[in-house]
Image (cartoon, helix red, strand yellow):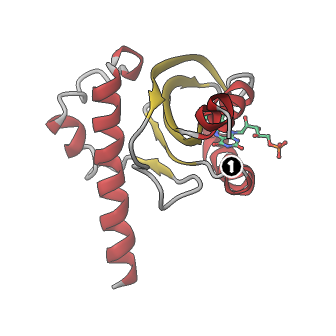
Amino acid sequence: MSAISSSSRALHRLIYASRVAIPAADVEHEVGAIIRASIRNNREHALTGLLLVHDGWFVQALEGPAQAVMERYGRIVDDPRHADAKVLAAGPAEAREFGDWNMCARDMSAADEAILDALALRAAFQPAGLSGPSALRLLRAVRGIQERTQLSGLG
Ligand SMILES: Cc1cc2nc3c(=O)[nH]c(=O)nc-3n(C[C@H](O)[C@H](O)[C@H](O)COP(=O)(O)O)c2cc1C
């Protein structure tokens, strides 16, 4: 195996923030369509991740083989359902953080918003200004909510 091909397969994570560009009445339907397409495509390319939809913003983590992450991001960024995408973090990752989901979307309910308080993000949710580590902390917190909600749903 050459060094180049092994690095193109090494685990990478990319996190970006973008503005939702979908009429409010259509957001739920469109996010559902995005998730269905994502699960289909991401499974095929060994991509996993989490998509947060909150207050007019998307924040998404995509992780998987470096080349697959960059190619998929290249397509996502051209999607007219969002705008002003800004990469907050991109680089090699030691392990998957969102390995349970080929893609999972999470909206923040009023109760969940306590998490934004804890992260000092609530007053003005401006994820495009987050550092890479802060963006990862935010999505990890969202992952925690998602896991707890799924568990309570099973009970
Ligand atoms: C915020 C956002 C996140 C998206 N995330 C993904 C993703 O993780 N995987 C994916 O395949 N498509 C994602 N999409 C959809 C892509 O932009 C594109 O519509 C899709 O990959 C094309 O699917 P197709 O190859 O079945 O036509 C996303 C779109 C938006 C607006």
Which quadrant, please, contains the N terminus?
A: top right
- Mark 1: few/some/many CA within 10 Å (<14, 14-19, 20+): many
Percent x, y of residue 107: 44, 47
Residue drawn at the location 34% of the way across and 75% of the way down = 151
- Residue reaching furthest bottom? 155
The picture quadrant where one finds residue 39 is bottom right
In the rendered view, would you say 137 is above or below 98? above
In the rendered view, would you say 6 is above or below 99? above
Q: Secondary structure at mark 1?
A: helix
Whether residue 22 is visible: no
The picture quadrant where one finds residue 18 is top right
Q: Amino acid at mark 1?
A: Ser
Q: Left of 97 or right of it: where is 79?
A: right
Whether residue 123 is visible: yes
Percent x, y of residue 53: 48, 39
In the rendered view, would you say 148 is above or below 107? below
Residue drawn at the location 25% of the way across and 52% of the way down = 111
What residue is disc 1 on? Answer: 38
Q: Specify whether tag 1 is near ligand 1 (CB below 8 Å).
A: yes
Percent x, y of residue 80: 74, 24
Q: Which quadrant of the picture is home to ligand 1? A: top right
Percent x, y of residue 92: 46, 32
How many labels sit on residues? 1
In terms of depth relative to the viewer, which is nearer, 27 or 60? 60
Which quadrant, please, contains the C terminus?
A: bottom left
In terms of depth relative to the viewer, which is nearer, 133 or 28? 133
